[in-house]
Structure formats: structure tokens, C-alpha cells
Image (cartoon, coloured by chain):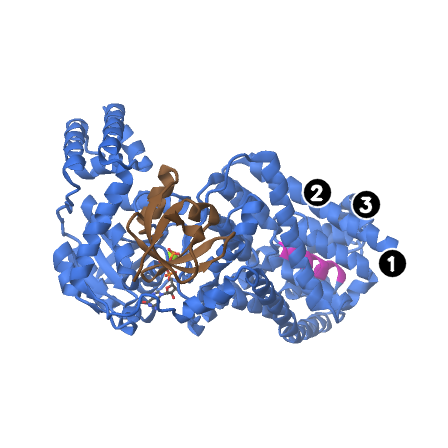
Chain colours: A blue, B brown
Amino acid sequence: MAEITICLGGNPNAGKTTVFNKLTGAHQKVGNWPGVTVEKKEGEYTYLGKTIRVVDLPGTYSLTSYSLDERIASDFLVKEHPDVTVVIVDASNLESNLYLAIELLELGANLVIDLNMMDVVRHKKWQLDVEKLSKTLGVPVIPTVAKKAEGLETLRQTILAARDHQPEPLKINYGLEVEEALSALTDLIKRSKDSSLYAPNRWLALKLLENNTQIKEWVRTLPKGEQIISKSEDLATALNDRLGRDVEAFVIEKRFGFISGLVRKCCRKPLGPEERISISDKIDQLVLNRWLGIPIFLVFMWFTFKLVFDLGNPLADYIDTGFSWLGGQTTALLGKNWFSSLLSEGIIGGVGSVLVFLPNILILFLMIGILEDCGYMSRAAFVMDRFMQRLGLHGKSSIPMILGFGCNIPAIMACRTLESPKDRILTILINPFMSCSARLPIYVLFAGAFFPRQSGAVIFSLYILGMVMAILTALLFNKLFFKGESSPLIMELPPYRLPTVKNIVMHMWHRASVFIKNAGTIILAGVIIIWLLASMPVGVEYASEQSWIGQIGKIFAPLFAPAGFGFWQAAVALMFGIVAKEVVVGTLGTLLAGGEEGLSEVLPQFFNGLAALSFMVMSLLYIPCIATIGVIRSETNSWKWTGLAVGWSLLVGWLSAVVLYQLGQLFA
Amino acid sequence: MCPLCAVENGRIVEVMDIRGGRGMAGRLAVMGIFPGSRLRMIQNGRPGPVMVALDEKRFGIGYGMAHRIFVRPVTE
Ligand SMILES: Nc1nc2c(ncn2[C@@H]2O[C@H](COP(=O)(O)OP(=O)(O)OP(=O)(O)O)[C@@H](O)[C@H]2O)c(=O)[nH]1
Ligand SMILES: [Mg+2]
């Protein structure tokens, strides 16, 4: 049992997860763009004999939320009442980052402010009076450089020391009109409140005037909830008239007024011409250019796949040779019996043929890691916004799409940052067409075996095909199922930072270990089942048409004949690939390879070049893997959308493969 | 007064009015963009989104929204 619960809140990209990782020793994902963390993550550490439970939250600008990830954060900050709330403030953007802290001080949360990114402040030669800031706000303020673990010891100490503080809620004077309404509403709340709402009455009243829907729902649960809400709405309307503007905006501006007074007292910036253009801005004038933006992105992508292939393949070949040798040795050593067959054909042939592609996958994740760390991700949203809006999507939809090149599961979760439900659902539905890293082994294998000279280009075109299908699907679905506008883009663009080698290597290692773990669990299980089915019934020739798996495959094989691969092994591979896309290669390895012959040497006996192409297209498009289907279900909360995603991709995958093969035959 | 999307690169402007729905004004306000804020146009990608600076922060704002943020030039 943890003795103290603390949470880490703050604006997006302020460094919350970096602090979390440093405190708990975890390896949660960090990246230089807003919206990396989209769910609560928990961890623990011990300090001076005390166990401290830490909750890392998604970023949010305020306690009023506009998207799902922000909602998770504000719900926790307001309702869970942790012992200590640590607000991570990006000190290089003090004004806007203090806003959330002020809202929490008004709530009376037990705050510790972590002034992060102090290295940037020092670099800019600003002078920050931390002491004064802390005195004025009445809470501890700790300067840190989370990336370098600087100041974290003090932070730990302060958190522990602060556990029993009970600060008075901060009171900001909102001017006569608002104060009058506030006190009327406060009285009303006081009279009907029970103990389930610990928040101060004045704060609740204020949030109601601000039209905070979450708080409204919360207040509605009170005995006289409805009455309070309707009163607050009347008051807000009257205030709008008296102030001549929205009371919501008015209150926010008052808070910023308070903050700017505070910052003027505590922070001195050397005078500089306001129009100074930073290096980051100069890069942006190029990268965000109207004409160059999209070509720059495509060139980067092309370069990525070139590297994945040209650099990854020689390495993959070594591993391949290693496994072939191992398979040969196993049979030589154990003789021909069921056990050696399980080892050499099942495990080494199946799992081995997947593991071979580890280098390619590592390079892919290296490149994605660089993209995420340097600050490009939110630029991609910017560059693509206009195009995406035309498809009925949103600029931010491009972020899950890029993440999909790694794995569709976190990519679909990342859709939580999209404000409008329509944008979010649509972005989720098209995500499986973005080719994930589990499909890469299929391409590398087939492209290497059939198109050794153009393999880079072949793989690149597959990725492009996936994107085109995503785009067409978006257009179609938008017409068919959705009405109404996309929400407009508003997104912070963090400064470019040089990716740190350590962070990227860690990220890469983490992904690699997932890949290896998959190979050792789900893929291993898959190939063992396939091996078993291929060896049954007893006495049958291994992996022959008469084996059980051959019988199963033969039922489905005719379906794929028009696509050029109407033999049962391909059908089985695609079927089992639904479990995880790596299993496609694993299955082929188990069924076709064996002994000394590597999979890539055997393949041409089954496929011709055109059939190989259409098999790759089929594998790219045909169905999301089971885990992805599960996430689509949980994120859309609807079987209807999930069914649509599955059915549509089956149709698109099959049709594309067939059309490609038939057309190819016409022209060949 | 002109919409933000009509401002040239490098110009400094002051926000005068935000003519969007209630949600939009609130969304912008909590990010620090409200009447009185000073923005510097870094990259106007018209008819795509614009990139503006607010102090040290940089924001990408979609065209549709930049269309409804009204500003006036600030002379130094
Ligand atoms: N210069 C500098 N960079 C930092 C510091 N702390 C974190 N960063 C970087 O800031 C970026 C954002 O860090 P994260 O920890 O992912 O931020 P977050 O607050 O969890 O972001 P979201 O989950 O998107 O809300 C990363 O590129 C970090 O490497 C710091 O003290 N100094
Ligand atoms: Mg985070």
C-alpha cells in the first residue's frame, strides 16, 4: 500500500513524463510534441522509507477540457484529491504554464510547483526569483532540469514535506459584477452541499459561471443540483449582458492579468528586439512552407525506407544465415523425429524467420524516434491541415497516422487528442491502413526475394498505397456516415530540439524488446499450433496437403486464386496473420522453409513476381490484427464502427490484390 | 482591424476580437490568446494554417480559425 499519492499535472509537453520516469525509474514514452501521454500512468518510488504512488497525467491547459486526454487529466486533478499535486511548469513559458497552477490553487489543491526546463531559462539569461514566486503563491516552487535529473532530489524532499499541508484556496478578485454573482451562487451551493464534493463552494460557483461541463455534471448530483445549475445559467446570462462579453473569457483574462502581475515581479528578461527570429523559426519558414512542406515530409519518408532496407538487410542476412545453420544443426544432431521437426521447422523456421527482421524494425523505430524527438510531429499536423480538412479530417489526424507506421495500437490511442468526436472516429477507422512495423517483415522478405534491385521502391510504394487507401476511405466514410464540421486546428508547436541519443536508443530498445517478446510469446504459440496442425493426423507427411492445416487451408485457398496465390499455405498464413501480422512470415517459415533452405530461396517455387506483389498488397490491407481490433472497439466504444473497420479492410484488401493481379496479367 | 489570416510574415499584431463560438474563444483563451494578446506572425500559410508567436510559444492555427480572430497592427 502506498502511503502517499501524488500526481503530475501540467501543460502538454512541459516534461511531466520525463519527471515521472526520473522519479519512478519507468520508461514511459517521452516526445517533443504535445499529446504524447493520453492516459493515466502509475508508478511508485520509495523515499526515506515512505512509498509514494505517482500518477502521470496527460497534458492540459486548464481544468476545462476540450478533448478526451485533457478530460482524463482534469477529472483526476479535480476529483481524485491526491495528497500532493505536482504541477510541472515549463519555466521558459511561465505565463501560459502558470494558468493551470492558478486554477488548482483556487481549488485549494495541495500544490508543489516544479519549474522545469530551467536550462532553457538559463540559456536565455532570464532571471527568475524562485523564492518570491513561492512566497507570493504560498506553495513550494522547485526549479528543475528534468531531462538531466537536476533538482529532482529537492523535489522528492519537498513532496514528502508537503504531504500534510492544507493550503487556503487562492482568491482572485474578479471585479464587482462577477463577485456578486459568485457569492449568490456560493450561498446556494453551501446550503445543498453534501460531503461528496470536497471542492470549495466558491470554486464550484466559479466553474459553473465558466460553463465547465464536467463540473456541471458533478454539481448535478447534489440534492438541489438542477436548481443550482439553472441559477448559474441565469447568472451567467445576466453577467454576459452586464460585462458586454462572455463571462467565461472574462474570468480567464482576469486570471492571466493576475499572472502577468506575478511574472513581472518575479522574472526579468533581458530586453531584446521583439522581432528576433530564432533558429527554430528559420527552420519553420522552410519546413512549414506552403509548397515545400509536403515534399519535405515525403523525402524524409523515402529516405527512411531506403535506410530500413539498405542498412537493415545486410544485417538481416547474417541473422538469417545463423538461423539456417541452427536449423540444419538441429536436424543433424537429433536425427529426423518429431522433436527435431518441432525445433527446426516449427520454432527455428517460424520464430526465426520473424526475428531475422529485427534490424529493419530497429531502424524504422530509430527514424520514428527522431521524428518524435526533434519536434516535427506537430509540424506534420500543421503542414497537412489543409489537405486533411478537405478529407473531412483534422490536421492533428496526421500524428496518429505517422505513429501508425510504428504500431496501430498506440496510434489509435493517440486519437484522443482530437477534439471533435467525428474527427476522432474517422481517424481511428483509417489508421489500420497505415502500415505498421509488424507488416514490414513481409515486405522485406518478398521484396528481397522477388525484386532485389527495386526493393526500396517497392516497399515505399506499399506504404504510399496504404496512405492512399486511408485517404480514400476517409473521403468515402466522411460522405457516408458523418455530417458536421471538423473542429479547427489549434496546436502548440514546440521548439525544435536535438534528439538525445540516450532517449532514442531507449525508445528503440523498448520497441525492440516488445518485438522480441512478441516473438517469444504470441508468435511462438502461433507457430507451435501451426506445426502441430501440420503434423496431424499421426503419420501424415509434415506440412502436406493431407495434414489438418492443409485441409483447413484448402477451404480458403480458392478465394485467393484470382489474386495469384491460391495455394493453401498462403491462405493459412493470412488466416493466422490476424493474430499478429508477424505470424504471416512465421507461418510461411514453418510450412515452407525447413532444413537448410531459407525461406527466401523457397518462395519463388510458390509465387511469381506478380503474385508476390499482390500478396504484399493483401497483407498490407486485409484486416487489422486482433489487438488493433480490440483497441478500435475500446476507443470507439462501438461494435458498429469496429465491424465496419474489419469488414471494409477485408473487402479493400481482397479487391486490391485481385485487381492488381488481374491487371498485371493483362499487361504482362 | 483585419483577420489574422491577412497578416504578413514578421508583423506584430494585437488581438482585438474573437468571433467564434463560445467554445472556441475559451479554447484560445486558456492558451493565452484573447483580446489584448500580442502575436507575431511567423509563417502565414494562407490558405492553410498560420504559425504565430505568443511570447516564447509558437502556435499553429487553422485557416478557418485564423479567419475569425480579428487583430490590429502594432506600431513599434
Ligand atoms: N531542455 C529541456 N527539455 C526537457 C526537460 N524536461 C523534458 N524535456 C523535453 O521536453 C519534451 C517533452 O517531455 P515529456 O516528458 O514528454 O512531456 P509531457 O509533459 O509528458 O508531455 P505530454 O505527455 O505530451 O503532455 C521532451 O522532448 C523532453 O526531452 C528539461 O528540463 N529541459
Ligand atoms: Mg507525457
Query: What residue is drawn where x is 60% and y is 66%?
Result: A299
Q: Nearer the viewer, mark 2 or mark 1?
A: 1
Q: Is residue A79 visible?
A: no
User: Residue A332: x percent and y percent?
Assistant: 73, 73
Task: From the top left corner, tell me how far across and down residue A46 is, in percent.
Answer: 26, 61
Q: Is residue A587 magenta?
A: yes
Dividing the image into four equal quarters, which quarter contains ligand 2?
bottom left
Which circle marks residue A651 in the picture?
2
Secondary structure of the residue carrying numbered label 1: loop
Callout 2: chain: A
Query: Split into 4 quadrants, where in the image is the C terminus of chain A?
Result: bottom right
Q: Nearer the viewer, mark 3 or mark 2?
A: 2
Residue with the mark numbered 3: A558
Amino acid type at circle 2 is Leu
Per the image, the residue denoted by label 1 is A668
Sequence order check, earlier mark of 2 and 1: 2
Highlighted range, magenta:
A581-592
Q: Position of residue B6 (x, y in %)?
A: 44, 52
Badge 2 element: helix
For the residue pair A260 and A458, the one nearer the viewer reads as A260
